[in-house]
Amino acid sequence: MKLSPHLSFNGRCQEALDFYQRCLGAEIQFMLTYGNSPVADRVPPEWRGKILHANLAIGESIINADDAQPGRYQSPRGFQLTLDVEDAAEAERIFRELSEGGTVQMPLQTTFWAMRFGVLVDRFGITWEVNCPLAPE
């Protein structure tokens, strides 16, 4: 069994996926627009270039993503995505890049459980925890 989060965006899915590719070294494995799908006639013409479904590989994990149909978008709430990063310098880079245009809720710092841990909301409204665990003794 695998758990794969599904993120919805309000018309900015392509921009978000491009951003995550740059920040996280992620890879878009699949992408389908509304216009290239059987539901093309159910969305306004200006929405046909938006993303109906995409798969983004981040390391060994997959995130599904889409642009919610017009009038159906809801802001994400009640969850965050946690990135476990083994290298403190890489955690700092990722945190810095993901927070560009977003809001830092907890600056990246040393904690009793991690070499680095911080929380941010990115420019697309997605909450990320960046965690670099302490090295095992």
Image (cartoon, rainbow, N blue to C red):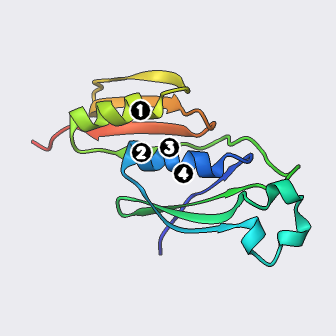
The x and y percentages for residue 79 are 59, 44
Q: What residue is pinned by disc 2? A: 22
* Residue at image point 73% right, 41% down: 75
Q: Amino acid at mark 1?
A: Glu
Q: From this viewpoint, is residue 17 visible?
A: yes
Q: What residue is pinned by disc 1? A: 97
The x and y percentages for residue 63 are 52, 59
CA–CA distance between discs 1 and 4?
Answer: 14 Å
- Closer to the N terminus: mark 1 or mark 4? 4
Q: Amino acid at mark 3?
A: Phe
Check whether the beta carbons of the residues at disc 1 and disc 4 lie within 8 A of each other: no
CA–CA distance between discs 4 and 3?
Answer: 5 Å
Identify the residue at the far bottom of this view. Answer: 38
Q: What residue is pinned by disc 4? A: 17
Q: What residue is pinned by disc 3? A: 19
Q: Dot 4 lies on which element?
A: helix
| For residue 65, side relative to residue 87 (left or right) | right
Check whether the beta carbons of the residues at disc 1 and disc 2 lie within 8 A of each other: yes
Is 98 in front, or is 105? 98
Q: From this viewpoint, is residue 69 visible?
A: no
Q: Quadrant of the C terminus?
A: top left
